[in-house]
Amino acid sequence: MSEAVPKKLLPQGMYAGKLDQQVRLKIPSDWANYFNSWEDKRLFCTSFDERNGLIYPMEVWQSNLDFLDNSEDTESSEVVTFTANKNGGTATMDPQNRLVFPANLRDALKLSEGQTIYLYCHRGHAEMLTEAGYQARTNITAPLAQSAADKMRKAGMK
């Protein structure tokens, strides 16, 4: 059985940054602090849909691998594991908190210099949206936001 991932103070808000000439993303300080709070400083960067990316602290990703290894749905587990590895790899932030994404992820997401990338926290990892992904997500969530918030408040959200 997999061990629980330790609870950490998660970054909040939406961060927008541009990829530099080397297709690196400057990670904001609250995200850098979060990623650096883990013993293992490596990050697993991937995509399941080749539209948006995911940045996992290695311990969070390892917890996912443990879950997938023990899943009764072996077909879905294999698809997720294969896709994550096909589109991703490990990376570390440099001393200036810049992140160079693995080449296969850059190719899958068609990342290039000057492109805007949005980061927000979800379930202990960073969701990484391209401009198109951000706009698509906004178009989907905007009409649902008020009713979803009302449902969550009714269910106990403060």
Image (cartoon, grey):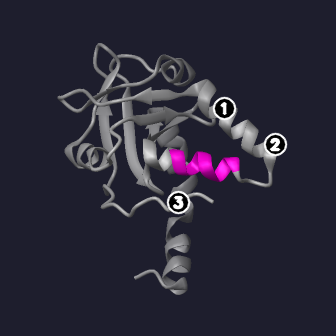
**Based on the displayed image, in which of its 4 quarters is residue 8 positioned?**
bottom left
Local crowd size for mark 3, using a 10 Å CA cut-off: few (<14), some (14–19), many (≥20): few
Indicate whether 37 appears above or below 24.
below
The amino acid type of the residue labelled 1 equals Thr
Return the disc, 3 or 1, that comes first in the chain's sequence: 3
Indicate whether 94 appears above or below 151.
above
Residue 109 or residue 136, whichever sits in front = 109
- Residue occupied by mark 1: 83
Residue at 54%, 57% (x, y): give it: 141
Residue at 56%, 64% (x, y): give it: 144
Q: Position of residue 79 (x, y in %)?
A: 74, 37
Q: Secondary structure at mark 1?
A: helix
Local crowd size for mark 1, using a 10 Å CA cut-off: few (<14), some (14–19), many (≥20): some
Q: Position of residue 136 (x, y in %)?
A: 55, 42
Residue 70 or residue 50, whichever sits in front = 70
Q: Secondary structure at mark 3?
A: loop
Mark 3–mark 1 distance (CA, rounded to whole Å):
24 Å
Predominant secondary structure, magenta span = helix
Residue at 38%, 43% (x, y): give it: 119
Side of 157 where 148 appears, left or right: right
Mark 2–mark 3 distance (CA, rounded to whole Å):
23 Å
Task: Provide the residue span drawn in magenta.
Answer: 62-69
Mark 2–mark 1 distance (CA, rounded to whole Å):
12 Å
Local crowd size for mark 2, using a 10 Å CA cut-off: few (<14), some (14–19), many (≥20): few
